[in-house]
Image (cartoon, rainbow, N blue to C red):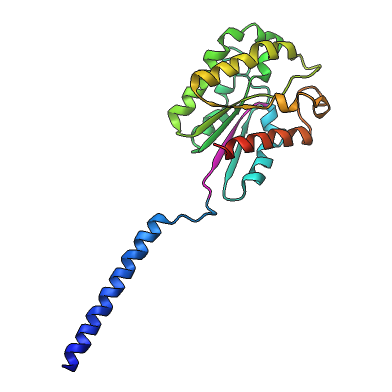
Amino acid sequence: MLRLSRAKILIAFIVIIIVVSNVAVVLTSYITPKEVDLTRVACLGDSITEYAGYPEYLQFLLGENSTVANFGVSRSAVNLNSDNPYYYKVNFQKVINFNATTVVLILGTNDVYIDNCLKINSFINDYRYLISQIRHSTDATIFIAIPPPVFDNTLGLDGIFFVEEVIPRIQQIANKEKMSLIDLYTPLLDYPEYFPDGIHPTKEGSQIITETIYKAIKNT
C-alpha cells in the first residue's frame, strides 16, 4: 500500500508539472511586454530631412526601442525630369532594405526651383509612382507631408508657386492614395525667423517639425 501511495503521488506530481507548463506556454503566447516597440521609421526627403536634425530628435521622442533612419538627400525633388530626382538616389534604394514599419515623406520644396516649375504637370504622377515603389516593397504605414513654408530666399525657390501649385497637388495625392497627411506648413507659417535662409529650419523650427510628425505617428 505504501509503494502504491508513493506511485500515485509521483504520478499526480508529474501531471501538475505538465499542466503548469502548458499554462505557462499559453500565457506566454498572449503576453507582450508593454515596453517593446518595434517601430522602424524611414525619413525620406530633401535637405530639410537630411540636415535639419528632425530624424534624430524623432528618435529621442520615440525612445530606444525604436529605430529612426535618415534617408534625406539634399536638393532632391519629386519630378523625375528634374536635375535631381529623389527616386534615383541611392538613399531611396536603401529604404527598400530597411524594413520600415513607418515611412515619412517630405518632398516638394525643390520642385519650385524655376526650372522645375515648368515640369509641375508630372508632379502627381511622379510622386504616386515613388509611393507605389515603396508599397511594392513594404507594408509600412506611409505618411506624406506638406513641407514647411518657402519664405523669402535667395536660393531661387518660388514661395507663391509652392502654395498655389505644390501644396494642392500633395493634398490630391494624399486623397487619391488614401494616405495620412501631415501638415508642416501651417504650424510654421508664422515663424519666418525659424528659417534664416527662407528654406532651412533652425533648431526651433526642426523641433516643431519633429513634434508634429511624432503626434501623427503616435495617433495612427
**25 relative to 203 in the view: left or right:** left
Image quadrant of residue 43? top right
Image vertical order of residue 59 relative to residue 137, above or below: below
At a point 29% along the width and 74% down the height, the residue shown is: 16
Q: Is residue 32 visible?
A: yes
Pick the residue in front: 119 or 64.
64
**33 relative to 61 in the view: left or right:** left
Q: Verify whether residue 42 appears in magenta.
A: yes
x and y percent of residue 67 in the render? 58, 44
Image quadrant of residue 199? top right
Image vertical order of residue 8 relative to residue 70, above or below: below
In which quadrant will I find the N terminus?
bottom left
The part of the chain drawn in magenta is: 37-46
Q: Verify whether residue 208 appears in magenta.
A: no
Extreme residue in the top direction: 118
**95 relative to 75 in the view: left or right:** left
At a point 52% along the width and 22% down the height, the residue shown is: 130
Q: How many marks?
A: 0
**22 relative to 50 in the view: left or right:** left
x and y percent of residue 217 in the render? 58, 37
Image vertical order of residue 90 relative to residue 38, above or below: above
Pick the residue in front: 206 or 23.
23
Image quadrant of residue 201? top right
In which quadrant will I find the C terminus?
top right
Image vertical order of residue 44 relative to residue 114, above or below: below
Main SS type for the magenta part?
A: strand
x and y percent of residue 24 in the render? 37, 65
Q: Is residue 158 visible?
A: no
x and y percent of residue 212 in the render? 67, 34
